[in-house]
Image: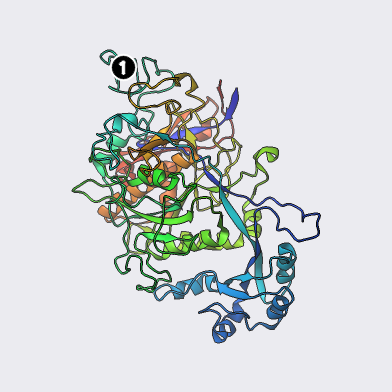
């Protein structure tokens, strides 16, 4: 039995849920007994980040270090320390750009530097020595960020699919998250009967009425009648790279018109070379890759939920366009590549890049371990904003930059909306950065709006959305092919796009708060699309408040007076074009037997 401690609120036409599939490893470990320094687990050896005091800005510019990497900073106390630790390079974390340097300086991001030194030196000691210098405002290790998901994809196949996906056919009936008809009384050998029955739905004669409840979806049909997306809205996907040539995604990509593909020069002056559809922040190159050994298709999967092209004999999405109506645009910010670890520097650069290149939504299916997770199984995590800020000052600075500087005064939103997965440790608290004020943290629900068996919930969690739950639907697993593709273990999971080398059809199933998260990113993007078309303007804070207000209690108890049902007015539906679910996690218990 898994005890689920959760309060769920559903918003009239929306979606909820997803579990974070990536986490940052920042647990410590002691040096090796051999005496040779070994960086603590989760640290990159020989690197720290520091923020110089604002008063040193003119000196840094004069020394030339602000425009190109250098061996010394020109700050005597810092350079003396670097000499002692065999420091050999300093470089600005965020490259100078012709269009955004002024606001970068206003936010203090020009003062952040990566310091490279001998890997034999103790990282913690270097951080401590830098931290006591009056010329240094902050110093921190460069931490690794690793994938926390298993990368398992259950391929989808109807027996008629091709590698291009062109002959798959409309897959909406396999997407309960968008259109939940209850999956009632299906027998693959007989005519489908019963209200809301799904022809061809892969349950092999099983009844799913108790775990698939009709209408427990994101009300996709109603939302798409109001708005089908708008190409002025850009969603940055911080993940593995998006498969750029996927049949369902190639028409939904953000394109940097001022850059040249595969160029080794920064043609548009934004600080990055060859970034036509995004950037690979792991290997520092403009051409993103999705087929390295160890890639799982995760970034492509979340991208499809948000903005796969609709009506083209493939899957359907929340804010993707059609052949005639453009939808929102997807920017691929690659922070994971194969089996390579990412870092907090790569993450911070990706966040600022997304901000400076027009993204207003960050899709982030990753995060730190929840501070309330079982430490023996998952390690320790942050419990407060203060802990996160002290230990991850660079990431917080980048996140604040996005929250405050994304969007515009004249567009549909001023400020950015970061959407994070709440975490998969079934802990009573969301993980950071999603738990940070200004972010939206998404938990996961199943097809009957019960919380997924793995999802984090409670403090720091904002919304819930469909994320899939294999364990909950274990009694639908089959030992043999159902006749509609090998769907063993796929029942109750989320179908979306994946690269063709992972699934021949170009589609597959995944589960997690990672899958719930892009539902909310898509909802936000669709709502902002409608605002753009109606010439409406919101601050990011106003829009997030609108998400929370436009909801109805779907799972409450009699004493939940502070969570009274809220009906969504026609005006609110028009402004948001979608509904949502909010999780408070402070009273109601739901028992799930597994």
- Percent across and percent down for residue 566 are 41, 35
Front-lying residue, 428 or 255: 255
* In-image side of 100 versus 67 (left or right): left
Callout 1: SS: loop
Residue 435, visible in the rendered structure: no
Q: Is residue 27 left or right of residue 542?
A: right
- Seen in the picture, residue 512 relative to 340 is either above or below; the reply is above
Pick the quarter of the image with the N terminus: top right
Query: For the point 45% across and 21% down, which residue is it?
Result: 477
Q: Position of residue 463 (x, y in %)?
A: 47, 40
Residue 485's quadrant in the figure?
top left
Furthest toward the bottom, the residue is 62
Residue 482 point in image, percent of width and height = 37, 21
Residue 498 position by quadrant: top left
Quarter of the figure with residue 194: top left
Q: Residue at x 35, y 49 (%)?
A: 525
In percent of width and height, residue 311 lies at 23, 40
Nearer-the-camera pick, 360 or 206: 206
Q: Which residue is mark 1?
A: 188
Q: Is residue 578 visible?
A: yes
């Amino acid at each position: 039995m898994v005890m689920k401690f959760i309060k769920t609120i559903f918003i009239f036409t929306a979606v909820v849920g997803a579990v974070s599939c990536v986490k940052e490893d920042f647990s410590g470990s002691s040096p090796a007994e051999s005496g040779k320094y070994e960086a603590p687990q989760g640290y990159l050896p020989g690197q720290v980040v520091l923020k110089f005091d604002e008063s040193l800005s003119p000196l840094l510019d004069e020394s030339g270090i602000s425009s190109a990497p250098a061996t010394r900073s020109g700050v005597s106390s810092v350079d003396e320390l670097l000499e002692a630790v065999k420091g050999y390079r300093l470089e600005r974390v965020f490259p100078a750009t012709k269009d955004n340097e002024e606001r970068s300086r206003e936010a203090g991001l020009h003062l952040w530097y990566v310091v490279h030194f001998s890997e034999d030196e103790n990282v913690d000691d270097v951080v401590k020595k830098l931290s006591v210098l009056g010329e240094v405002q902050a110093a921190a290790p460069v931490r690794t960020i690793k994938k926390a998901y298993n990368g398992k994809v259950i391929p989808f196949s109807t027996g008629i699919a091709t590698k291009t996906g062109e002959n798959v056919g409309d897959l909406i009936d396999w997407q309960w998250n968008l259109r939940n008809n209850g999956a009632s009384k299906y027998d693959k050998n007989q005519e489908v009967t019963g209200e809301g029955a799904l022809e061809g739905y892969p349950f092999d004669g099983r009844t799913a009425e108790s775990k698939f409840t009709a209408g427990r979806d994101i009300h996709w049909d109603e939302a798409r009648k109001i708005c089908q997306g708008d190409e002025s809205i850009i969603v940055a996907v911080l993940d593995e790279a998006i498969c750029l040539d996927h049949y369902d995604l190639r028409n939904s990509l953000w394109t940097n018109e001022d850059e040249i593909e595969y160029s080794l020069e920064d043609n548009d002056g934004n600080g990055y070379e060859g970034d036509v559809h995004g950037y690979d922040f792991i290997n520092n190159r403009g051409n993103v890759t999705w087929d390295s050994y160890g890639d799982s298709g995760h970034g492509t999967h979340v991208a499809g939920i948000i903005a796969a092209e609709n009506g083209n004999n493939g899957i359907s999405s929340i804010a993707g366009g059609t052949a005639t109506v453009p939808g929102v645009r997807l920017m691929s910010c690659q922070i994971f590549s194969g089996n390579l670890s990412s870092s907090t520097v790569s993450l911070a650069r990706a966040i600022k890049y997304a901000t400076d290149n027009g993204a207003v939504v960050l899709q982030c299916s990753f995060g730190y371990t929840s501070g309330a997770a079982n430490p023996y199984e998952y390690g320790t995590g942050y419990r407060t904003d203060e802990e996160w800020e002290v230990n991850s000052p660079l990431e917080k600075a980048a996140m604040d930059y996005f929250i405050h500087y994304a969007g515009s005064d004249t567009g549909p939103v001023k400020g950015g909306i970061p959407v994070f997965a709440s975490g998969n440790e079934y802990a009573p608290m969301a993980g950071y950065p999603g738990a940070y004020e200004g972010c939206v943290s998404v938990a996961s629900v199943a097809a009957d709006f019960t919380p997924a068996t793995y999802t984090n919930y409670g403090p720091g969690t904002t919304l819930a959305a469909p994320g899939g739950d294999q364990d909950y639907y274990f009694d639908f697993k089959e030992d043999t092919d159902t006749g509609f593709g090998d769907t063993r273990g796929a029942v109750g999971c989320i179908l979306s796009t994946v690269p063709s080398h992972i699934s021949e059809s170009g589609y597959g199933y995944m589960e997690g708060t990672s899958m719930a998260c892009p539902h909310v990113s898509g909802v936000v993007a669709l709502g902002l699309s409608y605002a753009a078309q109606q010439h409406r303007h919101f601050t990011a804070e106003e829009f997030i408040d609108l998400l929370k207000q436009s909801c109805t209690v779907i799972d409450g108890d009699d004493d939940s007076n502070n969570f009274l049902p809220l009906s969504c007015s026609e005006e609110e539906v028009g402004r948001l074009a979608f509904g949502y679910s909010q999780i408070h996690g402070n009273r109601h218990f739901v028992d799930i037997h597994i």
